[in-house]
Amino acid sequence: MSGKKKNPPVPTEFSLDHEGEELTFTKFTSKELGRIDVARIPRFRFPACPICLELGPDEAEHVPPESLGGQVMVWTCQRCNNDFGTAEDRLRSFIDLETTAYIEATDGSVPGQRAAKVALRSSEGRPHGMFIRSAAAGFEEILGTGSGKLSIKPLNMALVHASLLKHAYLAACLTNREIPMNAEGDRVRAVLLAARDRDADALTNAQKVLGFEPAVGWIEAPGAPPILLMESEESGELRWLFLLGGRFVVQWPLKDVEPILAV
Ligand SMILES: [Zn+2]
């Protein structure tokens, strides 16, 4: 028994205070025009790692991450597989809006700082809600005194975005049975390699050059395959979106490459 509390339901719209900046999230409600079950296409081993293009990749890669309902779909090299790992933990935290909160008693009743894993929720016109998932001894005690100083560790959104891009990109490679060897593919891989290597400056630069806005949303789709490619119309514009793990939506990551849809 992990004792982990069940996620509170995600409201249609909510915002999150992130380093003083208000981020607003909207539950995905686009009208679906069609559904193509990409998961029916078998997993595929490209001759090269789709991220760094090194030949002979032999690490099984889940798309999306296993913790988000993914299955082994593709193979990457050891370095891309391992070194991306903790960036994906942040993606998991983001999807759950989970972060670490610290509390310190200002009245000296409990010594030191105590941490807790918390889920943040808020909806328009209402104060933010914080749901404690698991807490160190003393955390709730200090919270109960009403005199605790609370701080929240912000998520590294650049790495969250890079993780979303990685899974959308791998899903796109699988859809087309091809690693895109063009300028757009190079721009995507530059972001992924900078994230893998935790090169913050290169990551900022590569993300600016690519201009990929993940357009994340949520869908309640229990039992959905790990990857679902959906054609969607929003404001009269047709676009392709991946539903990953039956829970979150990311747009097709390659502007210059159209999905090749298997009949
Ligand atoms: Zn690689």
Image (cartoon, helix red, strand yellow):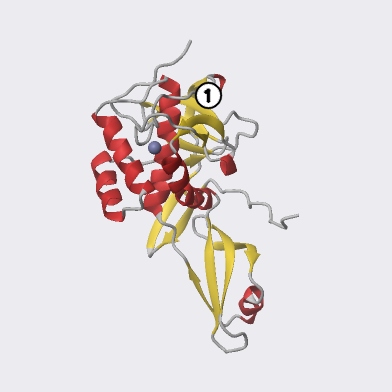
Report x, y in % for residue 259: 39, 21
Q: Answer yes or no: is residue 220 visible.
A: yes
Report x, y in % for residue 72: 56, 32
Mark 1 close to ligand 1, CB under 8 Å = no
Which residue is found at the position 50% from the left and 42% from the top?
A: 27
Report x, y in % for residue 158: 36, 51
Check disc 1 and give the amino acid type: Arg
Q: Quadrant of residue 171?
A: top left
Report x, y in % for residue 13: 50, 48
On the picture, is 184 further left or further right than 195?
left
Q: Answer yes or no: is residue 232 visible.
A: no
Q: Quadrant of residue 183?
A: top left
Q: Nearer the viewer, residue 14 or 172?
A: 172
Q: Nearer the viewer, residue 134 or 203?
A: 203
Q: Which residue is mark 1?
A: 43
Which residue is found at the position 38% from the left and 21% from the top?
A: 178
Of the 4 image quadrants, the one containing the N terminus is: bottom right
Secondary structure under the numbered disc 1 in the rendered image: loop
Residue farthest along the front direction in this orientation: 56
